[in-house]
Structures are given as structure tokens and as C-alpha cells.
Amino acid sequence: MFKSIITIIKKDLEKSFDFNNLVDDAFAMHFGVCQYIRNKYLWGYPKNVKKLQKIFDTNDIDTLSNQIWHKIKEDYQSSKPKI
């Protein structure tokens, strides 16, 4: 279940934002992407939030959205070809 939620969010972010620019833009990450994740995938989905909070060991939804974004960013950066 964890992988499926993260995959859904990642695919949505790739469609909705210029993903390459988001990876290194801390301002956009905090105020744009994390808010987007909270609004679309966390608020209104208490079961998902509880499961993800256990996985990421947090009780704070702001921290949770940030940790989800960092996980997606790490996966994205590790899948990019090295030049």
C-alpha cells in the first residue's frame, strides 16, 4: 500500500509540475509541492494519513507531506542516469 500511494503521488507530480526544477527548488518544494500533497492526498484521507504516519514515524501532517516529497525526490534522483 505504501508504494502505491507514493507512486500515485509521484506520477501526479510529474504531470502537474516541472519535476526537474522542483527537485532542487526548496521554496517550491515547501510551499508548493508539500501543500499540493497535503491538499490532494492527505486532508480528507485519515486512513492513508495514519498508515503513512506510522511508516514515516511522525504525527505532524506538515512533516509527513515533506517526508513524502523527500522520498519521491530521492527515488527520482536515484533513477536519473548519471552523466
Image: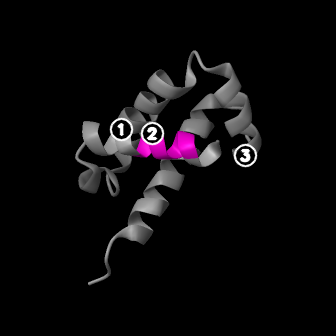
> In which image quadrant can residue 4 be found?
top right
Q: Are marks 1 and 2 in contact (CB under 8 Å)?
A: yes
**Residue 51 in picture, x, y percent from top left:** 72, 35
Q: Which residue is mark 3?
A: 55
Queried whether the magenta region covers residue 53, the answer comes back as no
Q: Foreground: 72 or 2?
A: 2
Amino acid type shown at disc 2: Ile
Q: Which residue is mark 2?
A: 9
Magenta span: helix, strand or loop, mainly?
Answer: helix
**Residue 50 in picture, x, y percent from top left:** 73, 30
Amino acid type shown at disc 1: Asp
Name of the residue lying farthest toward the bottom: 83
- CA gap between label 1 and label 3 equals 21 Å
Q: Helix, strand, or loop for circle 2? A: helix
- Point 45% across, 39% down: residue: 9
Query: Taking 47 as reference, is 59 above or below it?
Result: below
**Residue 53 in picture, x, y percent from top left:** 71, 37
Instruction: Pick the quarter of the image with the N terminus.
Output: top right
Q: Foreground: 63 or 55?
A: 55
